[in-house]
Image (tube, helix red, strand yellow):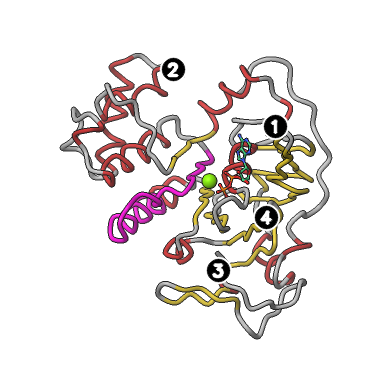
Amino acid sequence: MVSGSPPEQTSRPADANVDVHRGRDDLRNYARGKRVIVSARNVSRVYKVGAETVHALRDVSVDIYAGEYVSIMGPSGSGKSTLFNQVGGLDHPTAGTVEVQDVLVSQLSRTQQARFRNYCIGYIFQSYNLIPVMSATDNVALPIILGGTPVDQAKTRAAELLDAVGLGNRLDHRPDELSGGQQQRVAIARSFANDPEIILADEPTGNLDTHTGEEIIDKLSGLSREKGTTIITATHDHKMLSVSDRVVSITDGSIAKIELRSQLNIQVGTIESRPTDPGPDGDRGEAAQ
Ligand SMILES: Nc1ncnc2c1ncn2[C@@H]1O[C@H](COP(=O)(O)OP(=O)(O)O)[C@@H](O)[C@H]1O
Ligand SMILES: [Mg+2]
């Protein structure tokens, strides 16, 4: 999967989720038979900017199970993207470890991280991040070609993926010839290019209107169900919660709570913690952001 000497393995405590999970028995039932695919342990990330020190992540530990759809909720600046960068191999933590599919990503070199990202992770960004001079097909085909597939085959697969997100009639369009929602659908198709087990979607609906955002969530959750892909989204979009299996709330770089969908009260445009089920940190009655 990743070249070079195999990264050192960590021994993983039985379940990192239990400490901050509301309803531990519910979690045990939920976790039964599931495989841990992402395991973050005591992850901290400190940025130094001039004389200032920013604690973007503080001692974060969480397990994600294969095939889950997990939303990381939290206000702007709470550390969501920083956490994604650790899981997706775009950064190294200041302390702690991140293991993804038995690879110790936090310990990989930059070159190993790049290979890991291309094969193991699909990334979707709020701002789409497509290559402006390339057609939709070429944008999706590029990571397949980088993986060593001949160009013709890669383009055929790219066209199939674009068709699956409803863009079969926009194959030759460049990003500036597509709407925001269409560009994000290209980004979804690209994220599935190498059939990754994990997709990281960092506020994928942040730049879209409500209706288009819902279409994007439908496409993403539909494809993940079909292929069994693990989806981790960062969001403060409450629409995403209805398709999430679990919601991890992050505040000021720390995990405040983790809830199963069944533990959330989801109403249109709002979400509240279930009042009858106080978590280990007590029910502070705050909305999961
Ligand atoms: N490269 C960086 N250099 C310095 N500070 C950063 C950097 N990236 C993020 N931060 C800071 O870390 C904190 C968490 O940021 P981020 O993970 O982007 O939050 P979110 O994605 O939840 O909005 C913020 O205070 C942000 O200003
Ligand atoms: Mg962010």
Determine if the magenta segment contains residue 208.
Answer: yes
Earlier along the polypeptide chain: callout 3 or callout 1? 1
The amino acid type, in three-letter code, at marker 2 is Leu
Comparing 230 with 170, the one in front is 170
Q: Which residue is mark 2?
A: 146
CA gap between label 2 and label 1 equals: 38 Å
Q: The magenta stretch spans which residues?
A: 197-222
Q: Is residue 232 above or below residue 20?
A: above
Say which element carries label 4.
loop
Say which element carries label 3.
helix
| The N terminus, quarter of image | top right
CA gap between label 3 and label 4 equals: 23 Å
Instruction: List the single residue furthest toward the left.
Output: 169
- Residue located 38% across and 53% down the image: 222
Looking at the image, do the residues carrying marks 4 and 1 touch, with CB atoms under 8 Å apart?
no
Q: Which residue is mark 1?
A: 50
Q: Nearer the viewer, mark 3 or mark 4?
A: 4
- Tag shown at residue 261: 3
User: x, y (%) of residue 13?
Assistant: 83, 49
Say which element carries label 2.
helix
The amino acid type, in three-letter code, at marker 1 is Gly
Earlier along the polypeptide chain: callout 4 or callout 2? 2
Q: Which residue is mark 4?
A: 252
Earlier along the polypeptide chain: callout 2 or callout 1? 1
User: x, y (%) of residue 49?
Assistant: 68, 34
- Residue located 61% across and 24% down the image: 113
Q: Nearer the viewer, mark 2 or mark 1?
A: 1
CA gap between label 4 and label 2 equals: 37 Å
CA gap between label 3 and label 1 equals: 42 Å
Q: Is residue 47 above or below residue 275?
A: above
